[in-house]
Amino acid sequence: MREFLVTLHSRNAELFWFGLIMLVLAGVMAVLSRITTIEVMGVNAWHKPIKFALSTTAYAWTMGWITHYLAPGWGPQAFTWGTIVLLGFEVLYIALQAGRGMLSHYNMSTPTYAGLYAAMALAATAVTVWTAYIGVLFFRGDFPQLPVAYLWGIRIGIILFVAFSLEGFVMGSRLTHTIGGPDGNHGIPFLGWSLKYGDPRVAHFVGMHALQVLPLLGFYLIHNPKIILTLGVVYGLVAVWVLVIALQGKPLVKLQNQQTHAVIE
């Protein structure tokens, strides 16, 4: 781990420090979740910003690592500082609202909150579009120094990240992350995914984190390009299947008679 962090710092110091700050912030909020009783819609208010901070760390460190392979002149400083400003704003606003015991997402109660929610959506969309552009560079460029399976893990990981990041519009257009019931119902501890109704956040999570899963598999475990391509397709189909379940108003896991059972139909 130390070697990874040292190398990451040499590749992109700004994204290294940004990711580390988000990680420390997640730790602080984890402590707050244990010593305060603030809730939003019946759920510990700090769980949401913790998840966003951890996800931001994963994104910042992943992109800081892989964009090092791109040819000079593609715009690394613009991307780096754009990521820091856009995602930093999103996480800090979510944390601020959590501390106040108020909604950040889907909060249309006042013009100010509606505007800030729209700003978060624009920030996330801008980062997604930027990531898509980087994906294009990975398809157009030559990377003879990279193992082919690793390179395809990066490419497919970016494709799935972009697709399932934009899947957030499924929730945004409905102003809810629950299909078939109200937000705030009983969910999986910490993750909050509904145990009673459809929850598109599951597919959102699974698809977006292909950005980490597939390159790691392509570098460490799977060295055959055909296998990593096949695995990428299967991974994407699983994420789509999870989304279809949610759109049908069904939970990925179901609460019945005080026990949790996997949905297999």
Image: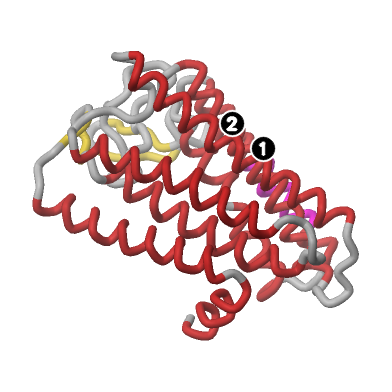
Q: Residue 111: which quarter of the image?
A: top left
Disc 2 residue type? Glu
CA gap, disc 1 to disc 2?
Answer: 6 Å
Going by the image, does 65 lie left or right of 223?
left
* Residue 96 position in % (x across, y down): 26, 40
The residue at the point 72 percent across, 59 percent down is 154
User: What residue would you read off at disc 2?
Assistant: 167
The residue at the point 43 percent across, 48 percent down is 88
Going by the image, does 130 lie left or right of 137?
left
* Residue 202 position in % (x across, y down): 48, 39
**Stretch in magenta:** 229-238
Where 232 falls versus 265 (above or below)? below
Furthest residue toward bottom: 3
Which is more toward the observer, 212 or 84?
A: 84
Where 181 falls versus 98 (above or below)? above
- Residue 163 numbered tag: 1
Going by the image, does 213 lie left or right of 155?
left
Q: Residue 113: which quarter of the image?
A: top left
* Residue 53 position in % (x across, y down): 39, 52
